[in-house]
């Protein structure tokens, strides 16, 4: 497989660049046709890679790309999941190069170069590594498992239609394991495998004061400013120790034992390098926990966006009628997203002063998940990493969320293997997102080895 990758790596990079040029932003209706174009691109490349059957499965939203390569009923089946939709590129002015015009640049962590573009790491680059792994295995006649692909176009907006598709196509999606590359590793020197993900509750809040915007000189000091009120309400959601103040928020949180925390702490972490990379003087978070713990095994509450009043050029002395914010809460095992959303809604409305009216609009959410490290799939992934990277991967807990993973387990009865190849510093969801060329090509090699080890372990 390594020789095939070396022979075709320039083409692999060029094809990925073509995919990255498609602005498949699922959250923006203006890009509806671009999202479909990305789906058609993926379908075509699956067919070229050797899939015997491919199709676009229509949904109420964006289509799901399905493909399969079945080599025999006696062989184990791997269901590959990923997504071809991407986050909005905003703020575009912070990109060093246009977000949908891929360029390759060297970085400190990617001396072999990284491809900069929206979706490079999350998740187009990692999905495309799976397609190229299939191509290489088919070309060499070394594919040892049946492979099914389910690549969606709505992961960044909650995967609502994928859930319907999964429930209606259980026989079609029948498999032995689900393989997902939408996560990260600790570093290129220290590979890792995620054994869990946090869940998510995402809401939008709207605070309304007077029935129209007012002159701040005439009304300022006499009428409540919704922006000020919103800021005060948000500030009250955490105490001085970084503890979330919503009543009942922690009731279902599973506290890890000292032994479990010590095991997770074996993963190398350089706090000084972390601070330098982000150019911050210090970190912040819940008292009593380390930075890696705060970003993996503890729940959080963060403001993802806030707006109101006049934000254009120059000055406008206005007291705004309305202020809004988007707020996300990352959840840990046993926390239920719907329950947390309801707790937030009730609390946020209860702390609103009489001077304003408050509306809480729930958006998408997802359940936290934990994957067993002793499963055949996890062991196969560990062996694949060890063979490709020369080091056994360290089990870690991921801080992000893939909402559909819990539904896979519920509806299909399958555990997922979270075998990602990006780095946390690859700026996913941020300006200047990128994916290392080394990570992309090494990912192709590792995925191919997963099939070999998974088939071997299934036989044993």
Image (cartoon, rainbow, N blue to C red):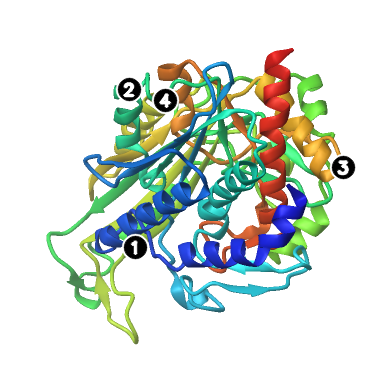
Q: Residue 418 appears in which quarter of the rendering? A: top right
Mark with earlier residue (1, 3): 1
Name which residue lies at 58% across and 47% down: 135
Residue under circle 2?
167
Q: Residues within 10 Å of mark 3 (few under 14, many from 20)?
A: few
Mark with earlier residue (1, 4): 4
Task: Measure the alpha-carbon separation of dots 1 and 4.
Answer: 43 Å
When the figure is inspected, residue 426 is found, relative to residue 338, above or below; the finding is: below
Answer yes or no: do the residues labelled 3 and 4 have beta carbons within 8 Å? no
Residue under circle 4?
173
Answer yes or no: do the residues labelled 3 and 2 have beta carbons within 8 Å? no
Residue reaching furthest bottom?
314
Left or right side of 414 for 191: right
Task: Measure the alpha-carbon separation of dots 3 and 2.
Answer: 40 Å
Mark with earlier residue (3, 4): 4
Task: Measure the alpha-carbon separation of dots 3 and 4.
Answer: 33 Å
Residue under circle 1?
307
């Amino acid at each position: 497989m390594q020789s095939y990758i070396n022979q075709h790596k320039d083409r692999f990079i060029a094809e990925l660049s073509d995919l990255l040029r498609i602005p498949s932003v699922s959250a923006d209706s203006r890009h509806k046709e671009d999202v479909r174009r990305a789906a058609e691109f993926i379908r075509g490349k699956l067919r070229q890679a050797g899939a015997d059957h491919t199709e676009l499965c229509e949904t109420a939203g964006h289509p799901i790309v399905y493909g399969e390569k079945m080599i025999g009923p006696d062989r184990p089946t791997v269901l590959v999941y990923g997504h071809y939709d991407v986050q909005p590129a905003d703020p575009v002015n912070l990109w060093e190069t246009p977000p949908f015009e891929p360029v390759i640049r060297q970085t400190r962590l990617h001396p072999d170069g990284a491809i900069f573009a929206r979706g490079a790491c999350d998740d187009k680059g990692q999905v495309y590594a799976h397609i190229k792994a299939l191509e290489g295995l088919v070309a060499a006649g070394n594919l040892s498992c049946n492979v099914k692909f389910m690549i969606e176009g709505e992961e960044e907006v909650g995967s609502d239609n994928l859930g319907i598709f999964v429930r209606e196509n259980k026989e079609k999606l029948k498999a032995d394991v689900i393989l997902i590359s939408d996560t990260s590793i600790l570093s290129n020197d220290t590979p890792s495998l995620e054994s869990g993900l946090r869940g998510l509750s995402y809401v939008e809040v709207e605070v309304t004061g007077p029935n129209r915007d007012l002159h701040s000189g005439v009304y300022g000091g006499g009428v409540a400013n919704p922006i000020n009120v919103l800021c005060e309400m948000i500030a009250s959601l955490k105490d001085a120790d970084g503890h979330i103040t919503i009543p009942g928020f922690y009731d279902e949180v599973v506290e890890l034992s000292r032994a479990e925390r010590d095991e997770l702490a074996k993963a190398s972490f350089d706090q000084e390098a972390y601070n330098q990379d982000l150019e911050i003087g210090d970190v912040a978070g819940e008292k009593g926990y380390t930075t890696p713990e705060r970003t993996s095994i503890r729940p959080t509450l963060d403001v993802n966006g806030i707006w109101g009043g006049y934000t254009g050029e120059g000055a406008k002395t206005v007291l705004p009628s309305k202020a809004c914010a988007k707020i996300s809460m990352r959840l840990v095992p046993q926390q239920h997203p719907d329950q947390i959303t309801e707790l937030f809604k009730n609390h946020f409305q209860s702390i609103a002063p009489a001077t304003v009216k408050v509306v809480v609009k729930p958006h998408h959410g997802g359940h936290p998940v934990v994957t067993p490290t002793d499963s055949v799939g996890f062991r196969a992934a560990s062996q694949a990493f060890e063979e490709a990277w020369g080091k056994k991967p360290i089990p870690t807990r991921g801080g992000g969320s893939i909402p559909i993973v819990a539904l896979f387990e519920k509806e299909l009865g399958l555990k997922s293997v979270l075998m990602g190849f990006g780095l946390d510093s690859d700026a996913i969801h941020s300006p200047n997102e990128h994916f290392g060329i080394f990570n992309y090509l090494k990912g192709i090699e590792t995925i191919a080895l997963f099939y070999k080890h998974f088939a071997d372990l299934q036989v044993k």
